[in-house]
Amino acid sequence: MTAAVLTGRSEGIDSAGLLFWRRGATLLPVGPEWLLEAVRDLTALGGVFLRNLIALGAIVALVFLRLRREAVLLAATIAGGWIVNTLVKLAVGRPRPLIVPHLTDAGGQSFPSGHSFNAAVVYIAIALAFAAMSPKRSVRWTLISLAIVLSMGVAVSRVWLGVHFPSDVMAGWLGGAGWAFLAVAMLQRPAKAVAQSLDGAAPAG
């Protein structure tokens, strides 16, 4: 996706995706006013404040459940994902789309979508952490599926609000989801070591 953006091959799908559900001279999305507010609420779940608040709550819950390895793993996954997304944004340096009105505030570079990337990282990583607590496959798959659907909804909302190209959110979501699964696999041993050191340093009783 990065190669397609850098070579201009994504321009067709980007223009078509942004204009798909817009009509009239104003190029505003079709739908009632309440739908716009609902999409803004959805996109807020991928914003810095709510996303990090939910992540912090999940980490604290894992600590209280004495699951220190999972708490360390979740924190490392989220922090690492934010670093990866920031580095790619700086490397590509793509400006925001200007062909449709922006229906919410957005700053910084456009590719990849930070909301899409970080929402996928946070919600999928949280789902993986808590899914590991259940012996039932149906429960594990339900948690992970809900996280995937929620993070995809955040990604779609960014295009609907006109602040990202479709290629931005596709790259963001795929990168974030990939990072969440990869980080869980890569960081399990380091997280276990940190958790054991914390257990050893904790006072007895």
Image: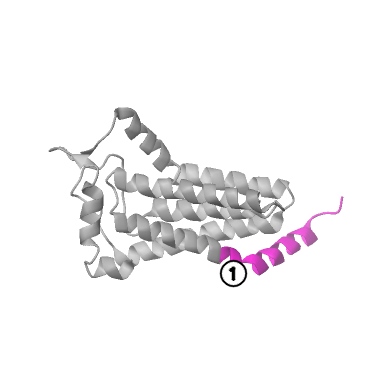
**Does residue 185 show up magenta in the picture?**
yes
Between 75 and 141, the one lying in front of the other is 141
Q: Is residue 45 above or below residue 125?
A: above
Instruction: Estimate how packed mark 1 is, as few (under 14), some (14 to 19) or many (20 or more) residues with alpha carbons within 10 Å.
Output: few
SS at badge 1: helix
Q: Position of residue 143 (x, y in %)?
A: 59, 48
Write the start and end of the magenta stretch as one range. 183-205
- Judging by the rendered image, the residue that carries numbered circle 1 is 186
Q: Amino acid at mark 1?
A: Met
In the image, what residue occupies the spot 53% across and 50% down? 145
- Can residue 153 be seen here? The reply is yes
Between 8 and 192, the one lying in front of the other is 8
> Relative to residue 83, is residue 193 drawn left or right?
right
> Relative to residue 201, is residue 166 drawn left or right?
left
Q: Position of residue 44 (x, y in %)?
A: 42, 41
| Majority SS type along the magenta span | helix
**Rendered-image quadrant of the N terminus:** bottom left
> Relative to residue 1, is residue 137 drawn left or right?
right
Outermost residue toward the right in this view: 205
Q: Position of residue 161 (x, y in %)?
A: 30, 42
